[in-house]
Amino acid sequence: MENKYLSTEVSIFCKGCGHQLIAVNTEKALNKLGLSPKDVILVTDIGCHGILDKLSSTHTFHGLHGRSAALAAGTSMGLENPKKKVIVFIGDGGSTIGLQHLVDAAVKNVNMTVIVHNNMLYGMTGGQTSGLTPEGFKTETNPAGKQYQNYDISSMLSNAGGSHVRRLVGMGDFSEELYQAFKVQGFSSVEVMEICTSYGVKFNTGKKVTDFIESAGMEIKLFPEKIRAPYKQNERDIMSSLFENIEAINVKYKNKLKKPLKIIVSGSAGEGAQLAAELFAEAAVGSGLKITKKGSYPVTVGVGFSTAELIISPKDILYTGIVTPDIFVITSNDGLNHAKAKLSKMKKGLLLIDATLNPVAVDPGVEVIQYKFRELATPRSAMFLALDILLKYVPSFPAEAFEEAIANSKIGAKFNMEVLKRAEVPKK
């Protein structure tokens, strides 16, 4: 049989690993389903199973540990197309880490199939106990055997409302069972019980996977089916596109920039540093320039530093972020403390810093200008004045473009534009 979906001729897994058998049977089931590889989306995450996506001829999505079900649900709901098949490959580690995602997909009855590769331990990281490790099963971290019961993932997904939930032993040909799951319009899952040949066999000599299934009371069966319509994103009908109301920025001004200019602005959270940088970026685009902006601030958002890295250029910019800036603009002590590491790397360029801040030791090649930004424009507007002064001192593009962007913004009604007009430009 030709392999249309998964290349399974040569195993990429440990010898005897059940993951290979899941791949082989998935290939058979998809062939029976008859879809084009372009109509199949395979979603994987961290774990031994995840290395299979590189051998897939379908669309693939490799996500973070435990997040494959969430990514698959979003993909399915976004497509909302019964002719597409979204399949999740997930291990026992990902199943327990992403348990809420799996349960939520079953509750909603999202149109997707989840294949749980349950080898009862963390196989990729050394054979540690997982949430699906049954009681009595020996692992690297429980050499005497696990002392408490496992999550019964299939029972949980069935109870949550999954349309088609099955548990089977990963031996022989179970492609028909996978095919039946793939046919379902709604949430389906197949938990494939297997034993890790590298660690499970080593720690549990003489035991079979069926021994632990029986002792854990996990039945090999198709759980009661629940025939109901798959989840639909009705909210989409009343939501407009996020891009509909975005107006294009027309080029109104001319610029004088001949090469890329790297600028870092650094102030305090809540004092408009990010907004000032965004309006600066808008003005640069309106002056015919290319620009990137990278914002940085603490998780707390409302306290501490707020820094933005801006690259403006007459040509395309193929990267973002700045190692060493050409210009540093600092308006607060929070900004200064955050800037010190990169400021120390400057050997030339310009430092525009508020006059209230302590003198900074910089390389002699760096021009330093201290200015009363906070006093003249108030702390919350200091960065607007600082960037306006910068454009008048280093005219890469007209300051009028920046002032117009401020005036047209929501902040414009609250900002005293006279501050910009009255401010004196430092002499060179």
Image (cartoon, rainbow, N blue to C red):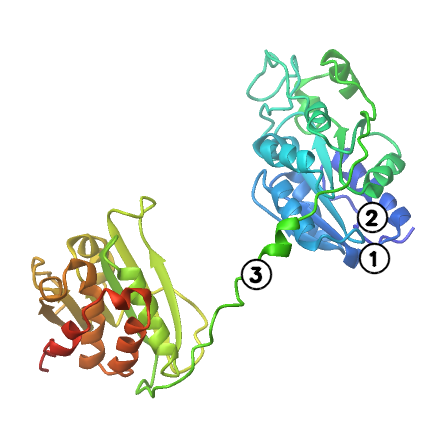
Give the percent coordinates (x, y) of residue 373: 13, 66
Query: Residue 9: which numbered mark, if any?
Result: 2
Under tag 3, what secondary structure?
Answer: loop
Picture residue at 43% right of the left edge, 68% below the top: 319
Compared to 426, does 115 lie above or below? Answer: above
Residue type highlighted by circle 1: Ser
Comes first in the chain, label 3 or label 2: 2
Give the percent coordinates (x, y) of residue 64: 56, 44
Picture residue at 50% right of the left edge, 68% below the top: 245
Q: Nearer the viewer, residue 291 or 276?
A: 276
Comes first in the chain, label 2 or label 1: 2
Give the percent coordinates (x, y) of residue 119: 70, 28
- In the picture, measured across the screen, residue 215 lies left or right of residue 297, that is right
The residue at which mark 3 appears reads as 240
Query: Residue 271: which numbered mark, if any?
Result: none
Compared to 334, does 251 lie above or below? Answer: below
Query: Residue 36: which numbered mark, if any?
Result: 1
